[in-house]
Image (spheres, helix red, strand yellow):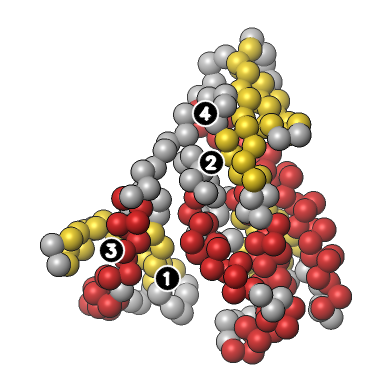
Amino acid sequence: MTFNIENRSFDYHVTYSKRKSIEIRIEPTGEVQLKVPKNTTDQIIQDVLIKRSSWIVGKIELLDKTPIKKRQYESGETVKYLGEPISTIIIRRHVLKAQISKVDNELIMIVPEEVSNDFISKMMVSFYKKLLKPLINERIQCYQHHFELSPKNISIRNQKTRWGSCSSERNMSFNYRLLMAPLEVIDYIVVHEMCHMDHMNHSKSYWKRVSEVMPDYEIHEKWLKEYGRWLHFDFMETL
């Protein structure tokens, strides 16, 4: 769908789900994503777009000044690992099984000659999932002394919009893309989800709890809002 205002237009997509508030997300492509409660009317959506139009247009204009570089999945490109760029080495050989490993500041992949970019992308996602899980477990242990309860299960997922989640049963999931962020940002998401063990909401009491555990959490929250969209394998890093 397209929204027009003040001689400017932008495309937007609406997703309806079980939630209480409306979330607006600007994709690196410039598309506007809205997540809204199931019973949200078209008029409410239009009112929200009008109210936030200046912010949305500003973000899109900022993206226009930063051209998107689509990853070609070739040797020499970089990916982020704990906030720092590392080089990718892609070796195509007559092999049946692909291999991937991180050696110093290089991500080395040996793949069959005819594999697609999508295959390489999925291989990188799986590898980052594998690397992130023990790191998340380690960071949870670093902050566990702040909490009486502890997480039951930890999973690493490929989520489009969420960096993490915590269920009422204390099952936590984290986005594999967090491995691209600096360690202190990962810590913020860990603390964010662990605080949900005490408060299953985003009330004032919840945010007070977050600030008790991590007084400077707002710095890391702001960083994610500003740069999180670039933590992605499909696009070249611009940080």
Amino acid on which disc 1 is placed: Glu
Instruction: Give the number of the mark in front: 2 or 1.
Output: 2
Question: From this viewpoint, is residue 41 visible?
Answer: no
Structural distance between the alpha carbons of marks 2 and 1: 23 Å
Disc 3: which residue: 57
Structural distance between the alpha carbons of marks 2 and 4: 9 Å
Disc 2: which residue: 233
| Mark found first going from the N terminus, 3 or 1 | 1
Along the horizontal axis of the image, is 180 left or right of 11? right
* Number of marks in the rendered image: 4
Question: Most extreme residue toward the top, as rendered?
Answer: 94
Residue 73 - label: 4
- Provide the secondary structure element on which disc 1 rests: strand
* Callout 3 crowding tier (Cα within 10 Å): few <14, some 14–19, many ≥20: some
Amino acid on which disc 3 is placed: Val
Disc 1: which residue: 23
Structural distance between the alpha carbons of marks 4 and 1: 32 Å
Amino acid on which disc 4 is placed: Tyr
Q: Looking at the picture, how far across and down is residue 62, in whole percent?
A: 35, 56
Amino acid on which disc 2 is placed: Phe
**Which residue is nearer to you in this view: 139 or 238?**
238
Structural distance between the alpha carbons of marks 3 and 4: 31 Å
Seen at 58% across and 87% down, the residue is 203
| Mark found first going from the N terminus, 4 or 1 | 1
